[in-house]
Image (tube, grey):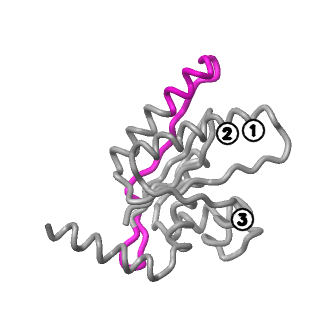
């Protein structure tokens, strides 16, 4: 099963594709989509949509997991990220993948086993689970991989087995 994790934003959007098979994780690829601050915001949204569509077509995920929005302070940033997230959700819908959303607390718990884990702990565990030599940069990319791992750890065994059976049948054709 290929899960594409996405850390939404509008300046940097992290993404990471994780293959989950036989209880093991492996990174298929990861990176970030960047937009320039000097570009008109509508142009930035267009770039996000186009690049996200490319990422979906490259990795061909079975499912997509994305972080739910959580903001403490800056309302202006919150609105921009929400608009960018809407464009990301549209690209996923047009691609046709099932979408799952997770809070930062759910991601931390699924990856480290501790909901109050600090960012370096989540990043280190992500690196360990995926057997990566280096920590992916920027941090948004590592976060996206953690979000994909979260989905792997959150889906039930019945769902996993059902998915594996349907994929085996599809590959046999």
Q: Which residue is mark 2?
A: 82
Query: Where on the picture, by quarter, is residue 28?
Result: bottom left
Q: Is residue 121 above or below residue 9?
A: below
| Residue ID at (82%, 37%) | 74
Q: Position of residue 155 (x, y in %)?
A: 51, 73
Is disc 1 in contact with disc 2, using a CB cutoff of under 8 Å?
Answer: yes
Residue at mark 3: 105
Callout 3: SS: helix
Q: Earlier in the sequence, mark 2 or mark 3?
A: 2
Residue 72's x, y, as percent?
83, 47
Q: Residues within 10 Å of mark 2 (few under 14, many from 20)?
A: some
Let me know if residue 91 appears in the view. yes
Q: Label 1: few (<14), some or many (≥20) within 10 Å?
A: some
Rounded to the nearest angstrom, the CA distance separating label 2 from label 3 is 19 Å
Q: Which residues are magenta?
A: 20-48
101 and 58: which one is in front?
Answer: 101
Marks 3 and 1 in Cβ contact (< 8 Å): no
Neighbourhood count class around disc 3 (C-alpha, 10 Å): few under 14, some 14–19, many 20 upward = few
As for residue 151 lying within the magenta part, the answer is: no
In magenta stretch: residue 21: yes
The relative height of residue 48 versus residue 117 in the rendered view (above or below) is above
Image coordinates for residue 104, horizontal then vertical, percent: 69, 60
Distance (Cα) linking label 1 and label 2: 6 Å
SS assignment at label 2: helix
Compare marks 3 and 1 and give the one earlier in the sequence. 1
Task: Look at the image and tell me in which quarter the C terminus lies.
Answer: bottom left
In this figure, which residue is indicated by the disc labeled 1? Answer: 78
Q: Nearer the viewer, residue 70 or 131?
A: 70
């Amino acid at each position: 099963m290929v899960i594409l994790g996405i850390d939404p934003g509008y300046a940097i959007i992290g993404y990471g594709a994780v293959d989950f098979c036989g209880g093991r994780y492996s990174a298929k690829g990861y990176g970030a989509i960047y937009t320039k601050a000097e570009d008109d915001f509508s142009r930035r949204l267009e770039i996000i949509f186009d690049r996200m569509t490319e990422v979906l077509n490259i990795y061909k995920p079975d499912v997509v997991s994305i972080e739910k929005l959580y903001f403490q302070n800056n309302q202006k940033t919150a609105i921009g990220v929400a608009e960018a997230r809407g464009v990301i959700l549209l690209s996923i819908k047009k691609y046709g993948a099932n979408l799952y959303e997770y809070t930062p607390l759910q991601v931390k718990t699924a990856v480290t086993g501790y909901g109050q884990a600090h960012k370096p702990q989540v990043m280190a565990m992500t690196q360990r689970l995926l057997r990566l030599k280096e920590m992916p940069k920027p941090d948004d990319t590592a976060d996206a991989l953690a979000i994909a791992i979260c989905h792997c750890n959150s889906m039930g065994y019945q769902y996993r087995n059902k998915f594996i059976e349907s994929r085996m049948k599809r590959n046999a054709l």
